[in-house]
Image: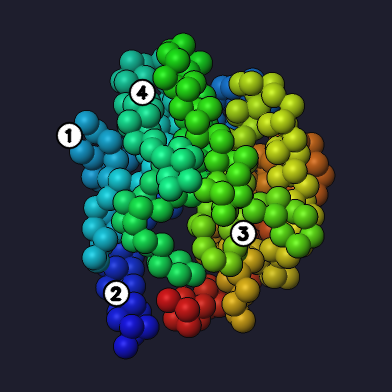
């Protein structure tokens, strides 16, 4: 009965989200992935992905013009720190290109929201919480936190500090980064597998699933923090993460499409068309930042999959079956 109720609640949320895509959370998340043409490798500048459409998101804003996402169903409209960071980073990109004050103000409102909402978890580490339940491999009970939120929040606050010189942005950047120095059992957002690979987890579930897009986005926060601090210990984590991704990319290749995660479920979890395209862009950025050839190789392979009609159709069907089976 509990499983059936969970399935019904999931469908009651997801079906309206896709039918009314323009007003649901999908209106924010599913921006076509695009690299920022003007980002710099060796200094903090324009964010690595464009996020222009995210910057112009206006479906649901609060009185301070901070984005809310409508998840439909029992969850409804909620603040999501990842979305707010991405909204702010999109505004930062527009500010760098236009120097318009409206973009500066929107960017700093996002930074201030993140500063105001950073709080300690049960282990005393400073994290951005999601204050709603979320279904993934298991139900993430409110409040829950995420390695992805930590990375993207850091990317935004680093830029806020450099733009304004205000210490509060730097102080909270330092606080947020500490979650990458601890494993999940210690209140952090990382783990090591049996082969010694170091992972950042987007969702902190009992059996780590190594979501690829969340890991890569979080890594960009570590890279930004390294560029800010030039701390050798931060560089070590960056290098560890690069080695983990490079070593494990073959596991994400299903032979016709990329996988969303490495869950130990019996059926593999193919990425949606959006996330597959996102993987391609993220790997291109990693190659530009690191020069590691395997990132370019897999981005090229997966781009080939993307433009193959049979592969796209197979991935769509497999994703539907996966969702029906596990959600």
Question: The residue tagged with tag 3: helix, strand or loop?
Answer: loop
> In the image, residue 272 lies at what x, y percent?
52, 64
Is residue 153 something one can see in this rendering?
yes
> In the image, residue 310 lies at what x, y percent?
62, 74
Residue 9 disc label: 2
In the image, taking residue 325 as reference, residue 118 lies left or right, namely: left
Dot placed on the residue nearer the N-terminal end, 1 or 3: 1
Gap in Å between the C-alphas at discs 3 and 4? 32 Å
> In the image, residue 145 lies at what x, y percent?
44, 49
Closer-to-camera residue (203/83): 203
Closer-to-camera residue (42/119): 119
Residue 39 occupies quadrant = top right
Identify residue for label 1. 63
Question: The residue tagged with tag 4: helix, strand or loop?
Answer: helix
Dot placed on the residue nearer the N-terminal end, 3 or 4: 4
Gap in Å between the C-alphas at discs 2 and 3? 25 Å
> In the image, residue 105 lies at what x, y percent?
32, 21
Gap in Å between the C-alphas at discs 1 and 3? 36 Å
Dot placed on the residue nearer the N-terminal end, 4 or 1: 1
Q: Residues within 10 Å of mark 1 (few under 14, many from 20)?
A: few
Identify residue for label 3. 210
Question: The residue tagged with tag 1: helix, strand or loop?
Answer: loop
């Amino acid at each position: 009965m509990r499983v059936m109720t969970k399935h019904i609640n999931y469908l009651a949320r997801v079906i309206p989200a896709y039918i009314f895509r323009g007003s649901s959370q999908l209106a924010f998340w599913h921006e076509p992935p695009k690299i920022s043409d003007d980002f710099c490798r060796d200094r903090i500048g324009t964010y690595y992905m464009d996020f222009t459409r995210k910057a112009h998101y206006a479906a649901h804003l609060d009185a301070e013009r901070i984005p809310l996402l409508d998840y439909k169903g029992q969850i409804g409209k909620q603040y999501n720190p990842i979305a707010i960071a991405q909204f702010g980073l999109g505004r930062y990109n527009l500010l760098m290109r236009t120097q318009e004050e409206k973009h500066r103000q929107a960017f700093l409102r996002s930074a201030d929201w993140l500063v105001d909402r950073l709080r300690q978890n049960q282990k005393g580490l400073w994290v951005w919480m999601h204050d709603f339940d979320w279904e993934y491999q298991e139900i993430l009970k409110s409040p829950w936190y995420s390695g992805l939120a930590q990375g993207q929040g850091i990317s935004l606050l680093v830029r806020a500090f450099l733009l304004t010189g205000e210490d509060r942005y730097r102080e909270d950047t330092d606080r947020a980064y500490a979650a990458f120095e601890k494993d999940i059992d210690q209140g952090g957002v990382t783990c090591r597998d049996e082969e010694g690979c170091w992972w950042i987890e987007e969702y902190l579930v009992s059996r780590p699933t190594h979501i690829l897009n969340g890991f890569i986005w979080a890594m960009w926060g570590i890279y930004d923090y390294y560029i800010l601090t030039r701390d050798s210990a931060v560089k070590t984590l960056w290098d560890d993460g690069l080695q983990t991704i490079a070593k494990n990319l073959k596991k994400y290749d299903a032979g016709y499409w990329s996988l969303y995660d490495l869950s130990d479920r019996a059926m593999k979890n193919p990425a949606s068309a959006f996330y597959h395209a996102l993987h391609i862009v993220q790997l291109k950025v990693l190659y530009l930042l690191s020069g590691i050839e395997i990132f370019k190789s897999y981005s090229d392979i997966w781009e080939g999959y993307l433009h193959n009609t049979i592969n796209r159709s197979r991935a769509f069907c497999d994703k539907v079956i996966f969702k029906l089976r596990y959600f």
